[in-house]
Image (tube, helix red, strand yellow):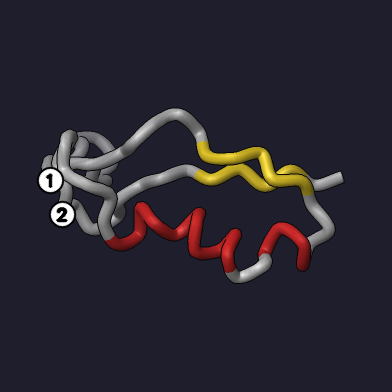
Amino acid sequence: MITVVGVPIDCVGVPEAGDPPFGTELSPGALRAAGLVAAVGGRDGGDLPVRLVGRVRDEHTGVLA
């Protein structure tokens, strides 16, 4: 069985910690609402208890958040 797990990450670097969720951070919930879990015959594992946000790029990878 497939377990679908959401990872709320902001890939555009807009919100900071403490700001409300925005944009791509809302993707896991939007995909659930669109029926993704049922479409793949999976189990909903919820979202990971993390929030990856920030405007600073990692110096090694160049990734925001």
> Which image quadrant for residue 27?
bottom left
Position of residue 51 in the picture relative to residue 60 (left or right): right
Q: Nearer the viewer, residue 47 or 57?
A: 47
Q: Nearer the viewer, residue 8 or 21?
A: 21
Point out the residue furthest to the bottom here. Answer: 34
Instruction: Say which of marks 1 and 2 sits in front.
Output: 2
Above or below, comparing residue 25 to residue 48 in the picture: below
Q: Earlier in the sequence, mark 1 or mark 2?
A: 2
Residue marked by disc 2: 14
Pointer 2 local density, CA inside 10 Å: few below 14, some 14–19, many at least 20: some
Q: Secondary structure at mark 2?
A: loop
Residue marked by disc 1: 55
Residue 11: x percent and y percent?
Answer: 30, 54
Residue 18: x percent and y percent?
Answer: 16, 35
Pointer 1 local density, CA inside 10 Å: few below 14, some 14–19, many at least 20: some
Quadrant of image for the C terminus: top left
Q: Residue at x 67, y 67 (%)?
A: 35
Position of residue 1 in the picture relative to residue 17 (left or right): right
